[in-house]
Amino acid sequence: MFQAAEQRQSKRGAAITTLELIYHSVVRSVRKTHNNAFMAIAVNILQSLIFVMTFYVMFSMLGLRGAAIRGDFLLYIMSGVFIFMTHTKALGAVVASEGPASPMMQHAPMNTIVAIASAAVGALYIQVLSLLIILFVYHVAFTPVVIEEPAPAFGMLLIAWFTGTAIGVVLLALKPWFPQFVTVFSTIYQRANMIASGKMFVANMLPSTMLMMFDWNPLFHCIDQARGFIFINYNPMHTDWHYAVWVGVAILMIGLMGEFYTRRSASISWGARR
């Protein structure tokens, strides 16, 4: 006798509802790292600065500044650090996002795709805001920042974020089945990219034997291509951003298929296995 009235939404209304849900989930994911959103951004800025200063001191002490691109040396270091951190932060955020067995999934509008999107966008938001603040302070307080092609350079950062998100989706799909393996692999991958990402050198200066050790990595292509757009004196000849895009698309499709299969097999008991 008493039945709930079925509410049907148009495609436009469903899209707006989904975007609104993603927005609120992004805010929640940003505040998850710290109760104060400004403190979460400040912590990320501090991490970026520590990375930049560490590599600056290391390059200076080892006498490797001559191996860098002719131009602003700190901008050369920051280009690698920012793109590397965007990639790894996106991967970590997606892996740590809500899974199919999470209590959040009990709420009707919520689903794993929204959780993945909000975690990825939240990581990108923090990284881009940190990047803009650091570059602004460096430009005003130290020396003018000159980026030859800012739009394509920012595009390389987005591709690095996209590939990190794609790898994170694959690991998130595997997480309920192999929780320990995913944790260990995620840590090893992020640590290995400290060198494998190529942020400490450029592809044009590597011999062909060493180039083969790095050109499998889409992040290596993103960083090298970004430096080609940032510096007028560098023209990357051994990397291609199209490769990073297609690898990211392929990995994302595999991850989404795995996530769909995992979601169908979701069990509340998974929470006790972690």
Image (cartoon, rainbow, N blue to C red):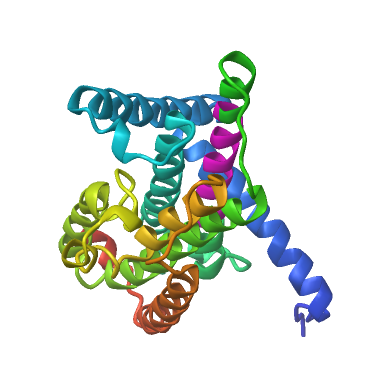
Residue 207 at x, y percent in the picture:
21, 61
255 is higher (above) or lower (below) than 149: below
Residue drawn where x is 51% and y is 65% of the image = 106
Q: Which image quarter holds the C terminus?
A: bottom left
- Regarding residue 119, the answer to whether it shows in the image is no
* Viewer-closest of 122 and 167: 167
Relative to 224, is 186 on the left or the right? left
- Regarding residue 237, the answer to whether it shows in the image is yes
* Viewer-closest of 125 and 258: 125
Q: How many labels does the image show?
A: 0
In this view, which residue lies farthest toward the top?
A: 141
Residue 137 at x, y percent in the picture:
59, 21
Residue drawn where x is 36% and y is 52% of the image = 92
Residue drawn where x is 63% and y is 67% of the image = 109
* Viewer-closest of 91 and 32: 91
Residue 77 at x, y percent in the picture:
40, 36
- Which image quadrant is residue 100 in? bottom left
48 is higher (above) or lower (below) than 5: above
Q: Does the magenta stretch include residue 89?
A: no
> Which is the main secondary structure of the residues drawn in magenta?
helix
Specify start and end residues of the magenta stretch as a single range: 119-134
Residue drawn where x is 23% and y is 73% of the image = 177
Residue 237 at x, y percent in the picture:
42, 65
- Which image quadrant is residue 141 in? top right
* Viewer-closest of 125 and 148: 148
Q: Which image quarter holds the N terminus?
A: bottom right
